[in-house]
Image (cartoon, coloured by chain):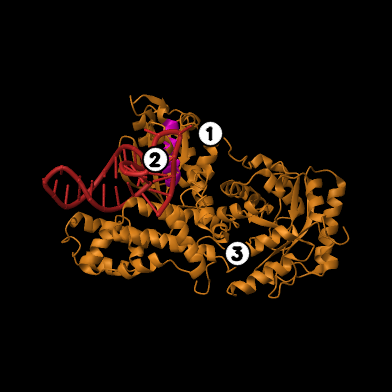
DNA sequence: GCCGTTTTCGGCCCGACTGTTTTCAGTCG
């Protein structure tokens, strides 16, 4: 979406990525390309941190950043660009990067096709392939040409990636159907689904069995299978009725841990782990961990023993992104990640008073079923007419109802009286301070003006945060995964203000939001900003979305102490009332 | 380009598959 500008940190990431990709197309040695990619990854999670530094020595403390890249980062900081990158752009058109998105086409052939045929874009590539001009090139043939065409078609037909929530549901359906046919089957998701990434490309499943053919037979004959793409002895791929690709692999039980480790990834994590193994005279692949000198097998049955054989504790799948977990696992100092059982309540829920479908009692009952101790009722405030925002009088009545319900003392769940207020164009809120002073939890969020410039949006949010009653900023970037990009907001400034004013930022756990996302959560954690998990439930079942909130929190390395949700109701209320007039 | 209680030079992750070769490069996960 046009107007959005990138933050300086994001621009650095893009510059380093372009450096990597253009170098790759140009044919630089792979190791140099890898070094740029690695630096881009470091910048992705800690870009602002890097740009705050002022000398090469400090920058070089980050593993993966050496003299050359440190100088480039400083150059970028001071001039806004990197001369090496500008030189590369002279030699290699930057549009060629888009060709690397085509499956079955990598940097070598992209360069060849550009040099020989002048092809720069996917459209030109398709035309060249259809005219059979690719097959004439040295090193390519008719097969390669049709594979590239197939790749372009695939790219155009698949609208993109699935939401984690959707992929998770499909995976559970498949696993349950297989277990019905093969009782006691050992089956696990692998890949990005097991790492609980916010979107999933295809579903990878792993099975441990001594009878792979029975598993293959059961898998390929599932009702939800539309088409079998390939069926081998230990690996099959199918397309489901919904058009989603599912890969299933079967390994021997003694290899299950190694295979799970291997197929869970991420790629970057595995590369790093294999480096560790190699330096230690060992080798790791999908079949096990081996000692190089005599090929002796050291581990393989469980992931724990696979990592232990390399002197590591087993990092939870959610953090296997090579963002420092490998080093931490070697030191035996992995963070204590939040778990579902640590969550004592939900901090964002709607009832039928605004645009939800269930009343206070029904929502409270759903919270009881989850073993919660509190539930924040945060219906929309007066200003948000489209969502049935509550007029002041209706809100006051709801607060009364909530107080009465709590006084009855017949539920383990304490209801918190709250509101989700809209931040208007000038940072103002729907109700007066006298009304806010009656609420336990004041949540604010942006619901309009998504196209405003960075400074305006940032100022709106920061102005709202300066109201001492305001304790939580909901869905801080406003993105809808796959539908709407984040609005242009300076999150660094918002996080700084959150720390200063003791305001929590939300991790909205609704499946298409997951806002803040993993990388931003890591930034918030580094700054000591508190996070509030809320499902934004509009019906009782939505409270279950907490699963995805917790998973995302884990991907952001959050511990129970980083979350308001791990507090007991009395501790939470103390936090929510701290520093407010009338408290 | 990065990195080093086995190295300041010579390494740098692993295996499978495919298609195009004449022994292997490119791509993928």
Image point (15%, 61%), residue name = A136
Which residue bears the numbered disc 1? A313
Residue A485 or residue A360, whichever sits in front: A485
Residue A563 or residue A158, whichever sits in front: A563
Highlighted magenta segment, given as a residue range: A256-275
- Compared to residue A145, the image places residue A186 above or below, namely above
At label 2, counting other C-alpha atoms closer than 10 Å, the crowd grade (few under 14, some 14-19, many 20 or more) is many
Say which label, 3 or 1, has the lower sequence index: 1
| A257 falls in the magenta region | yes
Say which label, 2 or 1, has the lower sequence index: 2
Location of residue A486 (image quadrant): bottom right
- For this view, does A133 lie left or right of residue A285? left
- For this view, does A148 lie left or right of residue A406? left
> Residue A30, image x and y in percent?
33, 51
Label 2–label 1 contact, CB within 8 A: no
Pinpoint the chain carrying mark 1: A
- Gap between marks 3 and 1 measured at Cα: 37 Å
Q: Which of labels 3 and 2 is toward the front?
A: 3
Chain letter for orange, please: A
Task: Judge whether residue A410 can be spotted in this image.
Answer: yes
- Gap between marks 2 and 1 measured at Cα: 27 Å
Say which label, 3 or 2, has the lower sequence index: 2
Residue A325 or residue A567, whichever sits in front: A325
Which residue bears the numbered disc 2? A248
Q: Which numbered marker is on residue A478? A: 3
Image point (49%, 30%), residue name = A308
> Residue A234, image x and y in percent?
34, 35
Q: Which of labels 2 and 1 is toward the front?
A: 1
């Amino acid at each position: 979406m046009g107007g959005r500008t990138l933050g300086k940190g994001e621009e650095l990431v893009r510059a380093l990525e372009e450096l990597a990709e253009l170098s790759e197309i140009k044919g630089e040695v792979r190791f140099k390309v890898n070094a740029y990619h690695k630096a881009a990854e470091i910048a992705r999670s800690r870009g602002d941190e890097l740009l705050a530094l002022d000398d090469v020595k400090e920058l070089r403390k980050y593993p993966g950043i050496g003299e050359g890249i440190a100088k480039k980062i400083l150059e970028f900081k001071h001039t806004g660009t990197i001369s090496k990158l500008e030189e590369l752009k002279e030699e290699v058109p930057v549009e060629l990067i888009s060709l690397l998105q085509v499956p079955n086409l990598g940097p070598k052939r992209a360069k060849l096709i550009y040099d020989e045929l002048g092809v720069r874009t996917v459209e030109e590539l398709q035309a060249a392939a259809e005219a059979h001009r690719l097959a004439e090139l040295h090193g390519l043939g008719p097969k390669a040409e049709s594979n590239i065409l197939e790749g372009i078609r695939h790219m155009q037909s698949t609208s993109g990636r699935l939401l984690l929530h959707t992929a998770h549901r499909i995976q559970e359906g498949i696993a349950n159907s297989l277990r019905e046919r093969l009782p006691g089957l050992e089956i696990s998701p692998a890949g990005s689904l097991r790492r609980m990434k916010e979107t999933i490309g295809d579903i990878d499943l792993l099975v441990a069995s001594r009878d792979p053919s029975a598993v293959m037979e059961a898998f390929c004959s599932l009702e939800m299978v539309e088409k079998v793409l390939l069926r081998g002895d230990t690996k099959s791929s199918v397309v489901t009725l919904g058009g989603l690709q599912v890969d299933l692999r079967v390994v021997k039980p003694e290899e299950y841990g190694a295979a799970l480790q291997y197929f869970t990834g991420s790629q970057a994590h595995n590369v790093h782990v294999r480096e560790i193994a190699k330096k230690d005279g060992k080798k790791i692949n999908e079949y096990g961990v081996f000692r190089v000198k005599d090929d002796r097998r050291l581990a393989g049955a469980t992931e724990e023993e696979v990592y232990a054989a390399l002197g590591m504790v087993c990092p939870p799948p959610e953090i296997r992104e090579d963002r420092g977990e490998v080093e931490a696992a070697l030191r035996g100092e992995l963070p204590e990640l939040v778990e579902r059982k640590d969550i004592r309540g939900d901090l964002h829920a709607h009832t039928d008073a605004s645009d939800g479908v269930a009343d206070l009692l029904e929502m409270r009952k759903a919270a009881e079923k989850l073993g919660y101790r509190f539930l924040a009722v945060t219906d929309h405030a007066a200003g948000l007419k489209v969502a049935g925002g509550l007029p002041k009088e209706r809100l006051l009545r709801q607060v009364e109802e909530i107080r009465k319900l709590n006084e009855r003392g017949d539920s383990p769940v304490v209801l918190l009286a709250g509101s989700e207020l809209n931040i208007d164009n000038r940072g103002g809120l729907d109700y007066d301070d006298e009304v806010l002073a009656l609420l336990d939890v004041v949540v604010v969020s942006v619901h309009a003006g998504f196209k405003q410039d960075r400074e305006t949006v940032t100022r709106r949010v920061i102005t709202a945060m300066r109201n001492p009653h305001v304790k939580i900023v909901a869905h801080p970037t406003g993105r809808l995964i796959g539908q709407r990009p984040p609005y242009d907001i300076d999150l660094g400034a918002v996080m700084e203000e959150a720390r200063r004013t003791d305001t929590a930022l939300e991790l909205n756990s609704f499946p298409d939001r997951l806002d803040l996302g993993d990388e931003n959560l890591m930034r918030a954690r580094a700054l000591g900003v508190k996070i509030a998990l809320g499902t934004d439930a509009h019906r009782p079942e939505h409270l279950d979305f907490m699963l995805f909130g917790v998973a995302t929190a884990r991907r952001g390395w959050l511990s129970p102490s980083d979350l308001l949700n791990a507090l007991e109701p009395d501790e939470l209320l103390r936090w929510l009332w701290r520093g407010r007039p009338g408290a």
